[in-house]
């Protein structure tokens, strides 16, 4: 195996870019070692060349795909409580603070990340924690997110969502992504404890409104569950980033093939020929694509609320 310690930074950058672009286009397994070594040199060795690359490549839209820091930061800065964050930090300052926190963190100093998925999940968690800290400090009367009750609610919701994966690494990554999703839902979608109960029971567990009402007869009025369900669905439609993550993690169980079908075939109306041409690494035949579409439709029919989420 190549000794990455002896590889020049310029070569690491070229290999990292090539492998990242290949993965984002094909979704086939990629060699993370070059990108990880760049991160390690930036954090542990203070290498200016490595730092300049990862700051640009992973902070902005130049990183092809959804997983760049600025997009995650903007999801907070333009969310329901974004004004509180924007009053304290610009986008650039927010991103800089996240990188500084990463470099000072025990995880950054130890740098035991084995995959880029784990490293990016950690950066995403830093962003979420920083944003939550800001909103808690600046508007404690508006946010109850710092209470132990919410933490327990989020943990309970995570445990209630079924997970059929057996790979421990994939399970950890999915649990981190789910925790991020639910935290964002609490900030941007749910406004009251009553709404949280309905989101948890209806959107996460798939219980029909009448069953939610039966379980909480002293909490809700007769038609309150249905009205609130519709209101939450409308908010979800206005937050496509959260909607896509909800579909991927909760409804489609983090299956990349099914998520691709939902996003491009169901939401955007892409043809089968287009999907096969652009995602040949996921679907090797027309029959495979049709089976994936059938599974997506089955999942959608099992949750009637999805019709509200995908229809104007």
Image: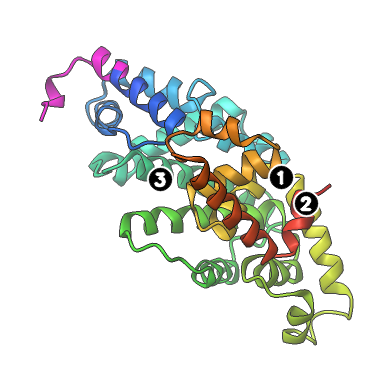
Mark 1, other Cα within 10 Å: few <14 / some 14–19 / many ≥20 = some
Q: CA distance from mark 3 to mark 1?
A: 23 Å
Could you tell me which secondary element the residue under label 3 belongs to? Answer: helix
Residues at discs 3 and 2 in contact (Cβ within 8 Å): no
Q: Residue at x 69, y 63 (%)?
A: 301
Quadrant assignment, res 195? bottom right
Q: Earlier in the sequence, mark 3 or mark 1?
A: 3
Q: Earlier in the sequence, mark 3 or mark 2?
A: 3
- Disc on res. 235: 2
Name the chief secondary structure element in magenta.
helix
Identify which residue is drawn at 62% across, 71% down: 205
Whether residue 273 sits left or right of residue 43 in the image: it is right
Q: Nearer the viewer, mark 3 or mark 2?
A: 2
* Label number found at residue 69: none
Residue at screen point 39% across, 26% down: 22
Q: Which residue is mark 1?
A: 239
Q: Residues within 10 Å of mark 3 (few under 14, many from 20)?
A: some
**Residues tagged 2 and 1 counted as in contact (Cβ below 8 A):** yes
Q: Position of residue 128 (x, y in %)?
A: 53, 47
Task: Find disc 3 in the rendering and name its residue.
Answer: 122
In screen coordinates, is 270 left or right of 12? right
Label 2: which secondary element: helix
| Quarter residue 94 falls in | top right
Q: Is residue 183 visible?
A: no
Question: Which of the two residues, 300 or 219, is positioned nearer the viewer here?
Answer: 300
Cα distance between the residues tagged 2 and 1 = 7 Å
**Does the magenta segment cover residue 121?**
no
Magenta-colored span = 1-14
Q: Residue at x 63, y 38 (%)?
A: 264
The image quadrant that residue 263 belongs to is top right
> Quadrant of the image for the N terminus?
top left
């Amino acid at each position: 195996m190549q000794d990455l310690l002896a590889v020049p930074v310029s070569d690491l950058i070229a290999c990292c870019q090539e492998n990242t672009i290949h993965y984002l286009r094909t979704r086939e397994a990629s060699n993370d070692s070059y990108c990880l070594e760049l991160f390690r040199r930036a954090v542990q060795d203070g290498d200016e060349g490595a730092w300049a690359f990862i700051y640009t490549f992973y902070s902005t839209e130049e990183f092809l795909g959804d997983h760049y820091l600025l997009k995650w930061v903007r999801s907070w800065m333009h969310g329901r409580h974004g004004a509180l964050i924007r009053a304290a930090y610009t986008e650039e300052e927010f991103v800089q603070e996240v990188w500084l926190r990463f470099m000072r963190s025990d995880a950054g100093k130890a740098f035991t990340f084995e995959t880029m998925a784990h490293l990016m999940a950690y950066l995403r968690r830093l962003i979420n924690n920083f944003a939550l800290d800001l909103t808690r400090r600046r508007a404690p009367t508006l946010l109850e997110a710092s209470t132990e009750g919410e933490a327990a609610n989020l943990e309970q919701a995570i445990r209630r969502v079924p997970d059929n994966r057996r790979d421990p690494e994939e399970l950890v990554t999915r649990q981190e992504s789910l925790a991020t999703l639910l935290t964002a839902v609490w900030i941007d979608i749910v406004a009251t404890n009553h709404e949280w109960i309905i989101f948890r029971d209806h959107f996460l567990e798939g219980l029909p409104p009448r069953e939610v009402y039966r379980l909480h007869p002293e909490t809700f009025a007769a038609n309150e569950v249905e009205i609130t369900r519709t209101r939450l669905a409308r908010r979800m439609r206005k937050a496509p980033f959260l909607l896509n993550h909800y579909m991927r993690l909760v409804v489609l169980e983090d299956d990349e093939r099914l998520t691709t079908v939902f996003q491009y075939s169901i939401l955007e109306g892409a043809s089968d020929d287009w999907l096969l041409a652009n995602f040949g690494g996921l679907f090797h035949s027309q029959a495979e694509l049709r089976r994936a579409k059938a599974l997506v439709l089955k999942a959608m029919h099992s949750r009637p609320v999805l019709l509200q989420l995908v229809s104007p």
